[in-house]
Image (cartoon, rainbow, N blue to C red):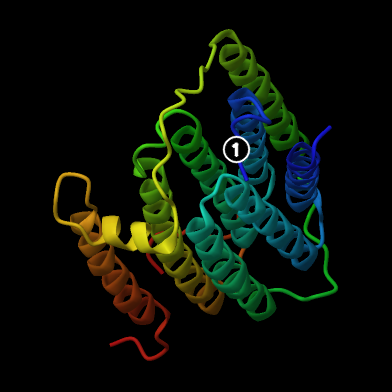
Amino acid sequence: MNLQSEIPLDYIVVLSAVVFFVGLLGVVIRRNLISMLMGIELMLNAVNINFAAFNHYLFPNRLEGHFFALIVMAIAAAEAAIAIALIINIYRRFATVSVDDVDELKY
Amino acid sequence: MTGPRIIFYILAASIVVFSILSVTSRRILRAAIYLLFVLVAMAGLYYMMNFQFLAAVQLMLYAGGIVVLIIFSILLTSQIDSKLDPPKFSHLLGGVFTAVGGILLSTITLLQFVFKPSGIAAVGTDIRSVGRQLMDTNLVGYALPFEVISVLLLAALVGSIFIARKDRV
């Protein structure tokens, strides 16, 4: 399948911009830590689409964007694991996952 | 309208609709399921760009790993039948203003630039050439980032076990 001849690159880049800012909206309007984490995952994925699309359209002779997207995915997995460990720990101490109620640095 | 074009429009529409639903839904478990749909549609997009390995990793790591992790943490931390608080008006105003303004600004900026497909012959993206390049130590290889990422994943593993441990010393 060859997307290059069917869809202009602009469409994919605009799609990725829309998903990025929707993820940003999720981070801003929600006060629940897990919802904010989901917004961050959306933003990371939007960036990954850009890497893959630029690789496919502009420089298909090397797989730079492909591997960059793979590494971003590994970082995102590590980040999600750490974030969820922190969220579980915060829930155990404060019995809530709302960022407004978790406002003490040292317990 | 050809087949790939229709598939792309379906994927793009489902990505946009489900990402907006995932952000605006007030039931957090539903938001996680909508996020899963977005991630699966993105795997389809990678598949259309001939990055089969990336699509498989997206399905395994995000749909199989991160979403399951998020659902587990939702089950551990929230009541299932409770709804999220509606956002404060100032947050909603700021968020919608930032999002719509950002989308408009980046779309206008992007549409002014003309991207020309380079037309260079594509390198094979089958699993054999991906694996060869990933483990290659030459100029076009990615062995060093691969090793660095493995050390990072080990550190994240140890760190998350340490953070989530119950009996802290």
> Which image quarter is the C terminus of chain A in?
bottom left
Query: Residue B9, relative to residue B165: is it above or below?
Result: above
Q: Is residue A31 left or right of residue A69?
A: right
Look at the image and tell me whether residue A103 can be seen. Answer: no
Front residue (pair B98, A8): A8
Against A11, residue A66 (above or below) is below
Find residue B24 and report its horizontal and vertical position in percent. Answer: 79, 48
Chain ID at mark 1: A
> In the orientation shown, which residue stands out farthest toward the top?
B112
In this orientation, which residue lies closer to the viewer: B138 or A47?
A: B138
Pick out the residue farthest to the front.
Answer: B121
At horizontal 74% and vertical 29% (from top left) the residue drawn is B93
Q: Position of residue A23 (x, y in %)?
A: 63, 43
Q: Nearer the viewer, residue A98 or B156?
A: B156
The amino acid at mark 1 is Phe
Q: Residues within 10 Å of mark 1 (few under 14, many from 20)?
A: many
Q: Is residue B8 left or right of residue A67?
A: right
SS at badge 1: helix
Provide the residue designation for mark 1: A20
Specify the quadrant of the image occupied by residue B43: bottom right
Above-or-below relation of B17 to B154: above
Question: Where in the figure is residue B16, as x and y percent of width and height?
Answer: 75, 41
For this orientation, the residue located farthest to the left is B138
Task: Determine the residue positioned at 69% across, 62% down.
Answer: B36
Q: Is residue A64 visible?
A: yes
Q: Does residue B18 appear to the left or right of B73 in the view shown? A: right
Q: In the image, what residue occupies the spot 78% across and 59% down?
A: B84
